[in-house]
């Protein structure tokens, strides 16, 4: 097994700045109707934990995994959930059971496409470790593993993410601020022709609408459509379309480049503490799609745009092995609150995609160099257009 | 039965201007990756016909119906089709059969909510007139009727649209340019707190991507969320949020106003001549949703956001009574072409929504006055922001 | 407008026998794991009301309508609900909102295919009469109207069911026993080449599984596939395939006969008092399909197999105009109870289909004679095979 | 009842061969409207290959894997496909892409629940071996792996199926007859309280309906509901409910036994050579559910009833890396043919489930003994009831 390097400097810096209360770990501007939570991330939903393993080694390992643990004890406190394939050119396992049961009882793991199998097996390891009776005297878990293809920067056939990495990611997942950009499953991602990866954002509803929170985490790998990139309404991609072009190795044929250009995916995870059932979370995920669309994306044929949402406010409890008790909390039914949750979801998704771009820096891998978004230049464009202050 | 007035002046003017080659019948600016077709409307798809009946009478009749006939002989030339309820607080009949069969064999009719029944019966009248054997020696038709609620400006309990109106609308439907704004089913609509109604737009792919066309027609009734209105990225609604406020009659309670404010719907009809099957048209409709999202909408709980798409390029032919023959045309499978169709759909949907706003003028009905979008002022805003030339 | 005859004698007799405590209004045998309720019908669910209007006139009017009112005040007490198009060659309106909202707030009306429009308009009449503020200061209703094609026995182009019939059906709908067979929407139906129509059945769970009830009402029009008919496992249709053949008028061509033979539909309405949400009711409807399959049906291409289910045990209450409050009852989560509900649903659906056949008698209409199932002979077959006692 | 013709020579040959090697390879009786193909199995569809790896070791390894390769070169000849979660308490990976693309481009692998990860990784190994450019210069594959829980007889936490097993299974998969019962993924299965596992069956349409074939393979693990078992209409399970009871080890608690009793799953794979698109194959899979229901199953809450169907008659060809060409074959549109395909699917599914029971023999594992169906006794019951000759 190759040696693993934690993708050090950037991560440390991000965490340091975040700890210092600065915005460097989060999107450097705000937009929309609702304020962000204190972390401007999915961990603004109390109890949600995030962890990464980042594998950068030699010239051709640029990959990793990201774990989202929905609550401290998911097997015994199953959170209400829904899953949606907006465009299904990709994998998110475990969705049949999410949609049939209406809940999520395992962590969510993101990784590269060909690592889905080992990551799934790693989730099983972690589940057995924490719930030793699964498959013995208790029911079996069905892992939720979602992928994006990082073959551009990573030798994906290697399947560098091993089961032990997954166990670590899940054990090390923490509440509070976390790194974004080229970390974890986001390590080898590219979106709009820029370096991308993990992004996150959150929105908080006013107190008179319950004060509920929406947190979104994305792994953005939406490919090459530079000219489509729109940031808070400003056609940034159009302005930058002839710059920062990815440097491809010479041995790749036109057909391969063209194929890869058409390819791309995004995984969107939406969390909330508003008590919503699976039917309502399905509606929430459709609004995540609308937020995605506002960045200029139209969800290509080659895109695995797979979404999962959960609510820590509507919980199915395990009362004993093989026994589950339904929530007694009523779901949110007030239209004004639901509409606000929809808007907050669209805003947070849009912001999370921007965050992925702003946090990810230029990376070379597999003979290819993908440039990071020129943050300062873009911020200046947004200011000039009056889109941000 | 009350007397019917053709909503004359505006309609005549629109048609006159259109005939004169001016853009007044269509959106006065262009945006996006692909050019519009010559009519910038759904009738840019050869064979597609549109008709309206507009009922404006006394103080409280502000309603109508719009017919879209997908091809000159839909019962014998069934166009490939799909339907989607993005948010189902509304009605579009006939969708079970569209999605099961993969085709559309009747016209599409749009009207007000409580007129769905009579409009359905009117479609049956029209079908019997044109296909006298239906239900006798041939199969029965299942009408496709979709609605939006115009109770704000119209006494909707009256059900002013009668069967004969529907027969006329469908018989009078024509290829070529057609009126938009407060006409037909759009007569009593309101969106973003402005007068709205029927809008349409089209996009044409480059010749090397087949030169296919996408045409969209919307009936936009998406309500009150003024501050959300975003036109080609410019937050126009935010700038106008304290002006042009709808004048409500005093007798309406706060609760009623509040309820109506939360309510709203949009019907989206997408047509193309690209050979696409039902599965692919379903994907197209999801991209229409993304275009819708770019106007600032997030599809409220109270919204009937119901979409139907069809392709005149993939046709199931009736060879005899009760006998249908599948298309022998291969569907489009090239990713570049499909992605372009997706983008064109999103663009045309976004443009059609703007068109509805730009074409509809201030209207009073049912004691309520809804103001039209201040077109020139908005165009100036867009120019100032550099969003249009 | 032609004169209407209430389809007197048979109806009166059925009700008389039912009132006298005899089994003639219900299936004359029982099968399955769970007992039937006292009425062996959908009205075993407390609060559910059923009504019929039966139109038999001259030689070619053999049609009607059936209303199912889910609760005494559906607009204010919205019952949890789901709808499913198992095969969508037919119409059931109102399903977009059922599946989006998770509830049903209007009555369900069944009628013939070309009468959907007028029946829809009749439901609007009834709603306005009972809830005069709908569409004025309150939200608008979306009727649920489902159809089967009775062109075989009925001049369907006449659209003999008028709005006033629908208002009567709904106002006259009652709790307690009700007529089945060739009544209401079932008047002109044919299934397995026998006369069919309305059937109903129920099942009651044991007390230790909550004592919940499942009631099913079907309108069975599943056509001509005589040889497929299987009654509690006995291939009755195979034995009777050369007898009781429908007498068609000579003027019908082979193609027409063939087309009609391939056509057919079934509407299935499932009611329960178990607290189930929309997601769970969707699962219940899939089990109704399994019960349907046990009669030998395979849901033909030409079949409108449209199902709706509701629970009076999980109710969304209107607290004011435009305001709804979610249920505070927890949903059933116990697997044993849910599995029993699934089985009870399959059994009651299967029984309801048999009931439709056993209750419907030979009828001539439109120049065609459809024979009723030879009840006594079939019962003897079942006894001989040991399938019933 | 008409005389049944045992499809003579082929069956005799099959039985002879089976007797020479193992026990009966196919169901020892026939029922239904359509004859079986020569192998009465999924391999009656030309080009379809099946392989097994069966792991029986020590006291607690009773598991394996089964591979179905849809065509000799699936990556380059993608077969039209659809997937359906009838009840989603289980895993079948790869379904998002099947339903979005409308095709299947990888083998299907069945295994135990906790082995999904390693099996997925094994499919990746196999794909890389056969298509070395995947993930390098070509697109990445998304494996289709489906599972059933064999914890009753197998120590499922061991994950005994390794990647190399999967590679072997797929490389060794063959056309022609194959073993059924307790083999491959079926090794540790139990259904209706009897030993079960892999079953298969086929049906052939008459020449005037195209002569198309339907082949079904199931992995039946549908648990404990003995009393529900119905074989061609005969309530066999009811008669045997107090015999052949599974012998559980004493250390298992009542709760565990109860939980396991409620659990169970079935994977259904349907193949055809009729040219059907994804939409139509979705309809086919719903009819597989109806066939399943005829065995007495109602698809429990704890059941992973996951279905995938494909057509070798409607093929998307890879013309170059990243390039696919749509089929030019028209889909079947004739109702009579489609209805026959639906019935054939229901029949073949029902037969395949019976086959799984008839082929599987008593097995002890993990301290538990599950008895095989007493074949001769059951055949006698069927003869006595007149259900078979």
Image: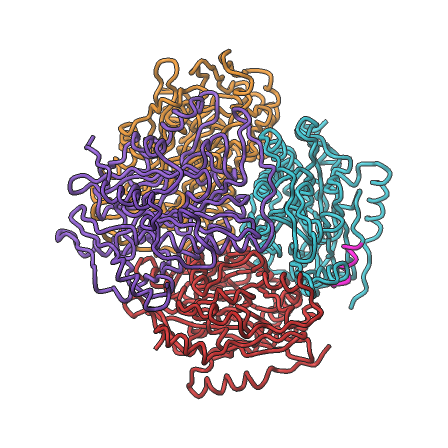
Chain colours: A purple, B red, C cyan, D orange
For the C terminus of chain C, the quadrant is top right
- The residues colored magenta run C162-171
- Residue drawn at x 37%, y 65% is A387
Above-or-below relation of A252 to A6: below
- Residue drawn at x 33%, y 57% is B333
Left or right, A160 with respect to D222, comes to: left
> Residue C329 at x, y = what percent?
65, 39
> Residue A274 at x, y = what percent?
53, 45
Decide whether the magenta segment is chiefly helix, strand or loop.
helix
Q: In this view of the protein, which residue sits in the foreground, D358 or C213?
A: C213
Q: Residue furthest left?
A: A250
> Residue A223 at x, y = what percent?
29, 54
Q: Is residue C243 magenta?
A: no
Q: In this view of the protein, which residue sits in the foreground, A10 or B137?
A: A10
- Quadrant position of residue C64: bottom right
Can the viewer see residue C193?
A: no
Q: Is residue C163 magenta?
A: yes
Can the viewer see residue A263?
A: yes
Left or right, B19 with respect to B53, comes to: left
């Amino acid at each position: 097994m190759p040696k693993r390097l934690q993708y050090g400097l950037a991560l440390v810096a991000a965490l340091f700045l975040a700890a210092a209360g600065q915005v460097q770990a989060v999107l450097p501007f705000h937009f929309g109707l609702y304020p962000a939570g204190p972390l401007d991330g999915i961990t603004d939903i109390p109890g949600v934990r995030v962890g990464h393993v980042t594998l950068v080694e030699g010239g051709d390992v640029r990959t990793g995994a990201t774990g989202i643990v929905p609550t401290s004890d998911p097997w015994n406190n199953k959170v209400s959930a829904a899953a949606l394939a907006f465009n299904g050119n990709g994998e998110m396992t475990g969705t049949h059971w999410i949609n049939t049961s209406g809940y999520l009882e395992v962590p969510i793991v993101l990784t590269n496409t060909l690592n889905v199998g080992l990551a799934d097996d790693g989730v099983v390891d972690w589940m057995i470790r924490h719930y030793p009776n699964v498959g013995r005297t208790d029911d079996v878990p069905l892992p939720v593993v979602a992928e994006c293809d990082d073959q551009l920067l990573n030798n994906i056939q290697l399947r560098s993410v091993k089961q032990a990495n997954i166990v670590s990611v899940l054990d090390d997942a923490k509440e509070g601020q976390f790194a974004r950009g080229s970390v974890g499953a986001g390590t080898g991602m590219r979106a709009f022709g820029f370096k991308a990866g993990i992004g996150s954002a959150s929105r908080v509803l006013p107190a008179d609408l319950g004060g509920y929170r929406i947190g979104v985490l994305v792994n953005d790998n939406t490919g090459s459509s530079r000219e489509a990139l729109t940031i808070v309404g400003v056609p940034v991609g159009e302005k930058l379309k002839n710059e920062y072009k990815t440097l491809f190795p010479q041995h790749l044929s036109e057909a391969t480049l063209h194929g890869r250009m058409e390819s791309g995916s995004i995984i969107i995870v939406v969390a909330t503490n508003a008590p919503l059932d699976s039917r309502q979370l399905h509606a929430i995920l459709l609004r995540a799609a609308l937020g995605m669309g506002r960045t200029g994306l139209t969800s290509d044929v080659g895109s695995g745009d797979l979404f999962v949402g959960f609510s820590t406010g509507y919980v199915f409890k395990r009362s004993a092995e093989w026994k589950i008790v339904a929530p007694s909390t009523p779901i949110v039914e007030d239209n004004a609150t639901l509409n606000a949750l929809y808007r907050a979801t669209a805003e947070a998704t849009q912001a999370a995609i921007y965050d992925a771009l702003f946090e990810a820096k230029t990376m070379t891998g597999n003979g290819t160099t993908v440039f990071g978004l020129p943050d300062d230049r873009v911020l200046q464009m947004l200011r000039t257009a009056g889109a941000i202050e």
